[in-house]
Image: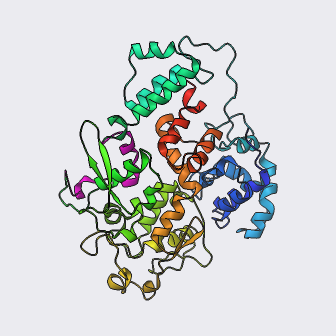
Amino acid sequence: MRRSVPVWALGLITAATLTVDAAAKPIGPAVFCSINSSAPVCQGQQPACTFCHTAPPERNAFGTAVAAALLPGTARPLSDAQFTMNLGAALSAVAEADSDGDGTKNGEEIMAGTLPADPASKPRADRCPPGVRNPVYDVCFYDRKYVYKKLNLDFCGRSPSFDDLETFAALGQAEQDTAIDDALSQCLESQNWVGKDGAVWRLAHRKIKPLQAIKSGSNSGIIPLADYDDDYNLFVYANTGDRDVRDLLRANYFVRRTDGANTTYAQIADLASQSIAADRRAGMITTKWFLVSQVMFSPLPRTAAAQAYRSYLNFDIAKLEGMYPRQNEPVDYDNRGVTADACKNCHATLDPLTYPFRNYDGLKRNPFGSYVNNRIERFFSGISPNIVNTPETGYVLGQPVSNLVEWGNVAANSDQFAAAVVEDYWKLLMGEKASGEAEFVDLWRKLKTDDAYHVEAMLHRLIRTEAYGVP
């Protein structure tokens, strides 16, 4: 059962997102989650601006209702203290309303982890409707026959044979559980799962963002700059076998793939296609492809930091997610105007995330994609008088880090990383994003503990969930 979320505390969410008649309060989500760590919206994530907005500064129905109840008649913008002291009362005033007209009160939606401004998002009924019957599957409860067929399709890429299904159906419940685990173990070694262009390989697409025109190595493009196959190989390697998935952000090694009837992956110390020294490596965010494609010619590579944050922690700063603003930031070392009112709220988080990337080069020096001591001083000193003072120390998830290797370690050990890993597989296998479901939270927490960060152990738990096993 979900624990109730104090309605007054949700004022901090709105404080983070109201931007028309009041300054944005990007600390709101983090403060809310520090107070209400059990809230569904805080389970390995933070509330986004879409809780109260369509696209900031435009409010959705719920945000409009809250804004109308928030100190009506008081001059805008409100101060931080006015927000904090009065939003609770405003939210209490709209808790019994139904802003999205879906038949569920705002307060009930908040406590259930659904969105009070989205009629398609509402609490699901816990009980199966009376009289529901299905001649093939038990559509109200975990159905082992359904799971056996589904996992073969999901992981092996094929349906089990009729004879296999008949044999499975004749087993007792305990024997069926064993058969399910055995089938999953076999499928996790299949080409459909671990092979080039297999299911795990495809999970990496949005993180690697391949562009064949500038690919080097096999099947190279017209301007071969870096080989993203190295990135896919590392991604699949860390996500399969008896391996620690945190190596996505911690690996100081590379991976060689051998194709054949059974694709294999092997850890190696160095690759001729890579340029980063071992002591400067942080897994996927220091590969040659990542640096070439995300840093390129940037003196202060904010794009690289934002892509790393989005890919491995599921925080999109452009959507006001994962806000951990630092006091006295941004400094605007490169004279890009980031201290302007329209920019500073995001950059107070983004710029400290970016500083540890300051010496990682994309395309300014050959070999491309390498670590260059005093990179800014050597290549970009003329951009602004203050740019050479850009530090290499920074912050990720509110924690100080001295360099990018430490950045990767802090991120990899966070709740957000574990939740993001499980989220990838949840969406792959369930077809939708998790929304703080208890089973989802249990999976990412046990990935960090019982499963020792081994994805395959987590997957054996995932196929036992009702989310996966109820038709």
Residue 291 horizontal/vertical position (percent): 34, 65
Q: Is residue 143 above or below residue 294?
A: above
Question: Viewed as shown, does residue 189 lie left or right of 28?
Answer: left
Most distant residue in the bottom direction:
385
Q: Is residue 466 above or below residue 55?
A: above
User: Splitting the image into 4 quarters, where does residue 262 fall?
Assistant: top left
Tell me which residue sits at (51%, 41%) in the image: 457
Residue 336 horizontal/vertical position (percent): 45, 77
Does the magenta segment cover residue 417? Answer: no
Tell me which residue sits at (35%, 41%) in the image: 194
- How many marks the image carries: the answer is 0
Most distant residue in the left direction:
222
Residue 155 horizontal/vertical position (percent): 41, 33
Q: Is residue 385 above or below residue 77?
A: below
| Residue 71 visible to an observer of this rendering | no
Residue 334 horizontal/vertical position (percent): 44, 80
| Residue 460 visible to an observer of this rendering | yes
Tell me which residue sits at (63%, 64%) in the image: 26
Nearest the viewer among 147 and 300 is 147
Q: Is residue 323 above or below residue 145?
A: below
Most distant residue in the top direction:
135
Q: How is the image coloured?
A: rainbow
| On-image quarter of the N terminus | top right
Range covered by the magenta-colored residues: 196-219
Tell me which residue sits at (77%, 45%) in the image: 4
Does the magenta segment cover residue 205? Answer: yes
